[in-house]
Image (tube, rainbow, N blue to C red):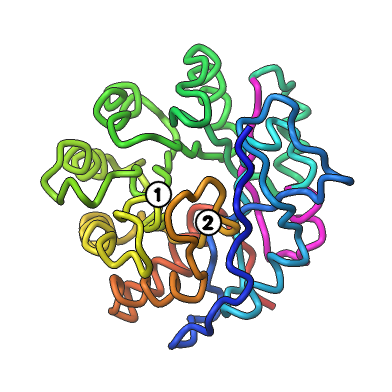
């Protein structure tokens, strides 16, 4: 079982202040394992990355809100994520992993606790595509809750599953720019398919995970043209996040302050940046107004 490297403990201060209400729309909490054990069938073991460290990072970077995405190392035990949301004083909401056996009451309880979506992993290093029957049946239940679905795909999956994705009747979010590979250029088939997918009014995309798109060297500038193109294609349906604490990074470990600066580079327009960081997360996740 793979053991993940720890995140960079010394994030630089971003070169510009972020707008009030800025949201990290993709981050994780891991453990601590002695309180929130990792799933026995996990494909990797992360370093503990608890709520306290995530909150400290957000305060340092100037991020007022966040969406904690349940990661596969905790399986469908969402307890660590729910604990972090409960302790966040309204700053955090969440994306859960479910197994399809949940009752309506259990889903309602997750909604009351701050969950706003479910996530399905398709990527090969996390076990490949889910049970598609469970996938379809779960998505059918999301509309009544006002939830959306988050799709973690390998680049080729965008092509393979385009028809199935376009049949989804609730908003859907593509993680990490679809994990397209910068080395293959803007004209690669998966990125063209992603841009075509973004014509669907239910389609959203996270313009983060530059370290996963890049050839792998900080500051991951080769990922910026892909993010800029997606923002241009769907400015009202783009999100951004840190992906802290960066599990399964085998290249250069990102510095989270540098990732904010990279975002400032590929989204230099203040109005578009406000959409990306504030207005779009408010619209999709329903964050309450800041006090």
Badge 2: how crowded within 10 Å, few (<14), some, or many (20+)? Answer: many
Q: Residue furthest top?
A: 133
**Quick one: 103 or 264, which is closer to the camera?**
264
Residue 139 placement, left or right of 41: left
Q: Where does label 1 land, which residue?
A: 176
Left/right of residue 119 with respect to residue 223 in the rendered view: right
Residue 200, image quadrant: top left
Above or below, 38 relative to 104 = below
For the N terminus, which image quadrant?
top right
Q: Is residue 83 magenta?
A: yes
Numbered range of the magenta stretch: 81-99
* Residue 157 screen position, x and y as percent: 32, 29
Residue at image location 50% in from the left, 76% down from the top: 257
Compared to residue 264, the image places residue 174 above or below, namely above
Q: Is the residue under label 1 in contact with that under label 2 (CB below 8 Å)? A: yes
Give the residue at mark 2: 243
């Amino acid at each position: 079982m793979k053991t993940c490297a720890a995140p960079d403990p010394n994030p630089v201060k971003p070169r510009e202040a972020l707008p009030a209400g800025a949201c990290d729309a993709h981050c994780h909490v891991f453990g601590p394992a002695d309180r929130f054990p990792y799933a026995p069938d996990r494909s990797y073991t992360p370093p503990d990355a608890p709520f306290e460290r995530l909150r400290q990072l957000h305060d340092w970077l100037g991020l007022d809100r966040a969406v904690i995405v349940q990661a596969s190392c905790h399986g469908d035990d969402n307890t660590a994520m729910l604990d972090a949301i409960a302790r966040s004083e309204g700053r955090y909401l969440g994306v859960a992993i479910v197994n399809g056996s949940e009752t309506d009451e259990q889903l309602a309880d997750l909604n009351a606790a701050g969950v706003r979506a479910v996530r399905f992993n398709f990527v090969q290093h996390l076990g490949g595509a889910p049970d598609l029957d469970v996938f379809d049946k779960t998505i059918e239940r999301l509309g009544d809750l006002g939830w959306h679905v988050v799709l973690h795909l390998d680049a080729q999956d965008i092509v393979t599953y385009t028809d199935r994705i376009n049949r989804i009747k609730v908003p859907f979010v593509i993680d990490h720019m679809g994990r397209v590979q910068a080395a293959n250029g803007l004209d690669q088939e998966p990125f063209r398919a992603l841009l075509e997918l973004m014509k669907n009014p239910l389609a959203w995309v996270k313009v983060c995970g530059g370290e996963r798109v890049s050839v792998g060297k900080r500051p991951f500038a080769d990922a910026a043209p892909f993010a800029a193109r997606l923002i241009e294609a769907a400015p009202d349906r783009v999100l951004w996040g840190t992906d802290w604490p960066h599990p399964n990074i085998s290249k250069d470990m990102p510095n989270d302050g540098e990732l904010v600066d990279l975002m400032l580079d590929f989204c230099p327009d203040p109005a578009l940046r406000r959409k990306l960081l504030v207005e779009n997360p408010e619209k999709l996740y329903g964050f309450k107004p800041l006090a």
